[in-house]
Image (cartoon, helix red, strand yellow):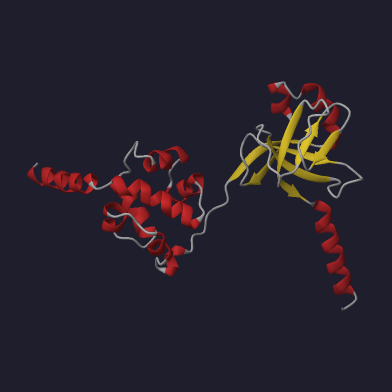
Amino acid sequence: MLKFLLITKIFSKIFDKMSYFGANIKKIRIVKKINQSEFGNLFGLTRAAVGSYEEGRAEAKIDKIIEISDYFGLTLDQILKKKLSINEILHFDKKKSEIKVPLSFNIIPYVDFSRRKQYDDNYHLNDFIDRLPKISLPDVEKNWRAFEIQNKREFLDNELVICSLYDGKPNLNDWYLGLNKNSWDLMEKITLKKNYYQIWRIERVYVRSLYKIYTNKLLNKLLNNE
């Protein structure tokens, strides 16, 4: 019993200094360009848990603190008792600073061109969206959506665009997909002239024809011994 009380007392002293732990893991994430979900995947934590540690709303268990500090080549004193500088983070042991972040896959609805008319009529029905085909892609959000584009006047013909629903905040560097029952329009700038029932911000583009072009060129080069 006495031994248990002594251990508890030692750890309570450590945890008194834990105000820097959340700030330190947040700074590590920012410097290493890792989001909360990716950081959590490295250590078996949820995104919410990582957020609660960073905001000081919860304390990590000592085994997780040790695991995180070991992974980044830090001592417990460094991660708990001092504010890490960017320079210190950049000079971690090189073998441990090269983080291999696992790809995070999500399944999202896929609207191919043959379902365009059905989507126009039923886009607002959850049951219809649930019955759409699904595709699994890396680093996408669950509420994103994939659309097949057919537009002979644009470069993006017969390609997939991966989109997030437009939040009303335009960005001059973004492209958008405006949907109405007459046309699906690619827009470099948001326009409200047409009566779009939905506007999506294009986050990713999967250019399938580019792969075909590259493959054909590569095959020709190999066959002709160029």
The x and y percentages for residue 72 are: 39, 60
Looking at the image, is 225 positioned above or below residue 6?
Answer: below
Residue occupying image coordinates x 84% and y 31%: 116
Q: Provide residue 2's location: percent of width, then percent of height.
A: 7, 44
Residue 146 lies, in percent from the top left, at 73, 39
Q: Residue furthest left?
A: 2
**Above or below, 30 relative to 223:** above
Asked if residue 196 lies left or right of residue 59, the reply is right
Q: Residue 189, relative to residue 81: is it above or below?
A: above
Residue that lies at the very extreme toward the bottom in this rendered image: 225
Q: Quadrant of the C terminus?
A: bottom right
- Point 31% across, 44% down: residue: 61
- 211 vs 176, nearest the viewer: 176
Q: Percent position (x, y) of residue 196?
A: 79, 27
Left or right, 17 with respect to 188, comes to: left
User: Looking at the rendering, which quadrant does residue 76 occupy?
Assistant: bottom left
Q: Residue at x 74, y 32 (%)?
A: 199
Q: Quadrant of residue 216?
A: bottom right
Question: Left of 113 or right of it: where is 171?
Answer: left
The quadrant holding residue 119 is top right
Quadrant location of the N terminus in the rendered image: top left
156 up-or-down from 224: above or below: above
Q: Disc count in the image?
A: 0
**Is residue 57 found left or right of 122 in the rendered image?**
left
Nearer to me, 191 or 24 = 191
